[in-house]
Image: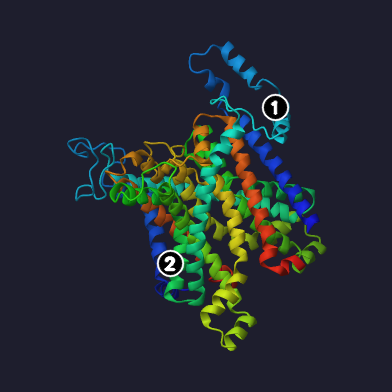
């Protein structure tokens, strides 16, 4: 696909173009935070609070207002993009890898090993995921990496099921049987013929899953058991200012909007990728 | 049918046993020691040891697990570390609040979802259709706390139409139920739309149109009932989700349901309550799916025959 036809395709789908622009913006914020942020994220600015110590609403000096400690909200949101994307990429990348490994092994070695792995996956489906994440995050000492691993442990299940189904149907196809008849070993078949076919699935879930991950991180941080202040995360900004939301609604609204825009964009792009890979599903669920 | 039911029940029981085992292992492998927490900061090692002995935490893990399962089979979920009462009644006391919120939330989801889904399917590729498809993603991309706090800000703090938090009157129910309902409705709309598009393309629908049946009647009486199956399945999934997944909404609105109980227990490392809630939630997930499977044959007789 040439750049021109890609551009034309995006003009026809303005929502998708907007989603791509938002993701590009979030990546830019994460990578260039020190350049883009007008203030340091944990700088308690001298005139960042009103005379009676309340956070300031959006103004020319503080574009999105200040928080309860007089820190610039815009700067905290820009640095928060780092946290969200880092956790999104690490946690979801891990989840996709675990899911694919479990799914492919269970699908390919469909005997005892496969049976055990898939029963375990079924078990995890019956596990209340949010509750599990909350329990783990609350009882372990919360840090960025712990939060990422907790999310990965909860989110691999769906990928495992899809990977399993696809591997099952692949491994009964004629070209795999032919390979095996010609003496190819399991490792070669897996690496050369099964895994490459799963790349599209991995890309779709790698994108859709980031949305789930960003939301889960925000929820855990909102409950105070995710990323810990003063390190800014979109969820913990709301957690810190929750009790002021009546007098300073911008402290809830802007971080919430950042989470919504990011998760929505990843979902829309993931959905569009799924359509590309499997056009028969276009416009379906 | 009876055999199928028996098999599904056995499967459900095995899954619950597995959930119990995983929860047990997870909670006892964690660094937080409930005996130390219970004893308080100034406790002597002797006090801690006594508490550990009282709770049976000094027994070997397999013995603890065996005791746990035996009690479980007798309907005994153990005793709360902090509240010194049995866990099962604590959870039962929270059940009405959670079930009320669940019923109201699902009702809102289904009402909005059916309406939007049917309109989108009938006017396929129109403006409403495209809007519904995008909105369905907005629903699953929005953090619950954002909607909850915004609704509180507008309808409770500013307009004063509804109370800020609490439980007891229908007015208390509105905002939490609407939070859950509008966020879930988009996905229902998507499912209804997809099922309706399938059904609307079938021959019998064309026949009905050809016979001159009014369009609204074709859609609502001929097509819609056949598109309800995925909705039932979705409600089954939702029952499981709402049992534990309403932690955020219950926390924001001070709704005294199971989610709030779990949230309080987690902060106090009250392991028996956490395990109890996890098990009850898993039970709800399994039962929700089972329920959907059992209702399906009544909606679609083809499943009964097959």
- Scheme of colours in the image: rainbow
Task: Please indicate, yes or no, whether residue A130 appears anywhere in the rendered image.
Answer: no
Disc 2 is placed on an element classified as: helix
Above or below for A139 versus A180:
above
Residue A252 placement, left or right of B219: left
Q: Position of residue B119 (x, y in %)?
A: 48, 73
Q: Position of residue A91 (x, y in %)?
A: 52, 47
Q: Position of residue B165 (x, y in %)?
A: 39, 42
Work out which residue is located at the far left of the displayed protein and give it.
A51
Residue ID for mark 2: A16
Q: Where does the C terminus of chain B fall, quadrant-wise?
A: bottom right
- Tag 1: Cα neighbours inside 10 Å, few (<14), some, or many (≥20)? some
Q: Nearer the viewer, residue B171 or B248?
A: B171
Task: Please indicate, yes or no, whether residue A47 appears anywhere in the rendered image.
Answer: yes
Residue ID for mark 1: B64
User: Real-space Cα distance between discs 2 and 1?
Assistant: 54 Å
- The subunit letter for the residue under badge 2 reads A
Report the residue at 28% width, 44% height from top. Answer: A248
Q: Position of residue B178 (x, y in %)?
A: 43, 54
Q: Where does the N terminus of chain B fall, quadrant-wise?
A: bottom right
* Image quarter of residue B77: top right
């Amino acid at each position: 696909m040439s750049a021109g036809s890609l551009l034309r395709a995006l003009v026809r789908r303005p929502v998708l173009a907007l989603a791509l622009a938002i993701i590009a913006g979030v990546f830019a914020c994460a990578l260039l935070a020190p350049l883009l942020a007008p203030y340091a994220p944990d700088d308690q600015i001298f005139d960042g609070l009103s005379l009676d110590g309340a956070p300031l609403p959006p103004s020319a000096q503080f574009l999105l207002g200040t928080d309860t400690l007089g820190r610039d909200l815009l700067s905290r949101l820009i640095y928060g993009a780092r946290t969200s994307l880092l956790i999104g990429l690490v946690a979801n990348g891990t989840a996709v890898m675990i899911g694919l490994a479990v799914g492919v092994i269970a699908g390919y070695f469909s005997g005892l090993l496969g049976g055990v792995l898939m029963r375990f996956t079924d078990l995890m489906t019956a596990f209340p995921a949010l509750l599990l994440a909350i329990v783990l995050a609350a009882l372990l000492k919360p840090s960025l990496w712990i939060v990422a691993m907790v999310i990965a442990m909860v989110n691999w299940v769906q990928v495992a099921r899809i990977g399993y189904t696809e591997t099952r149907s692949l491994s009964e196809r004629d070209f795999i049987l032919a390979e095996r008849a010609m003496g190819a070993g399991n490792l070669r078949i897996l690496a050369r013929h099964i895994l490459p076919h799963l790349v599209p699935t991995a890309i779709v879930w790698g994108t859709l899953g980031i949305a789930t991950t960003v939301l889960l991180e925000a929820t855990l941080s909102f409950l105070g058991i995710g990323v810990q202040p003063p390190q800014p995360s979109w969820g913990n900004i709301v957690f810190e200012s929750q009790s002021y939301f009546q007098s300073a609604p911008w402290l809830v609204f802007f971080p919430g909007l950042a989470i919504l825009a990011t998760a929505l964009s990843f979902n829309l792009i993931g959905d569009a990728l799924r359509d590309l890979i499997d056009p028969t599903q276009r416009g379906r669920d | 049918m009876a055999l199928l039911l028996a098999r599904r029940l056995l499967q459900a029981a095995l899954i619950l046993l597995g959930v119990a085992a995983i929860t047990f292992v997870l909670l006892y492998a964690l660094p937080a020691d409930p005996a130390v927490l219970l004893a308080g900061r100034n406790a002597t090692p002797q006090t801690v040891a006594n508490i550990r002995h009282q709770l049976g935490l000094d027994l070997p893990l397999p013995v603890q697990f065996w005791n746990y399962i035996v009690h479980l089979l007798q309907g005994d979920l153990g005793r709360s570390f902090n509240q010194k009462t049995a866990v099962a009644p604590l959870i039962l006391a929270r059940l009405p609040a959670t079930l009320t919120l669940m019923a109201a939330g699902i009702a809102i989801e289904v009402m909005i979802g059916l309406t939007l889904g049917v309109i989108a399917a009938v006017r396929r590729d129109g403006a409403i259709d495209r809007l519904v498809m995008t909105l369905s993603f907005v629903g699953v991309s929005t953090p619950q706390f954002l909607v909850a706090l915004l609704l509180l800000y507008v309808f409770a703090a500013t307009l004063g139409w509804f109370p800020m938090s609490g439980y007891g009157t229908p007015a208390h129910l509105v905002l939490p139920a609407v939070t859950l309902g509008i966020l879930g409705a988009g996905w229902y709309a998507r499912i209804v739309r997809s099922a309706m598009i399938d059904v609307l393309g079938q021959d019998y629908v064309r026949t009905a149109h050809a016979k001159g049946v009014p369009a609204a009647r074709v859609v609502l009486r001929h097509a819609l009932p056949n598109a309800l199956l995925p909705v039932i399945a979705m409600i089954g999934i939702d029952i499981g989700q709402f049992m534990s997944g309403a932690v955020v909404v219950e926390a924001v609105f001070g709704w005294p349901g199971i989610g709030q109980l779990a949230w309080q227990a987690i902060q106090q490392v009250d392991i028996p309550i956490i395990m109890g809630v996890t098990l009850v939630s898993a039970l709800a997930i399994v039962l929700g799916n089972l329920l959907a499977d059992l209702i399906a044959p009544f909606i679609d007789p083809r499943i009964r025959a097959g």
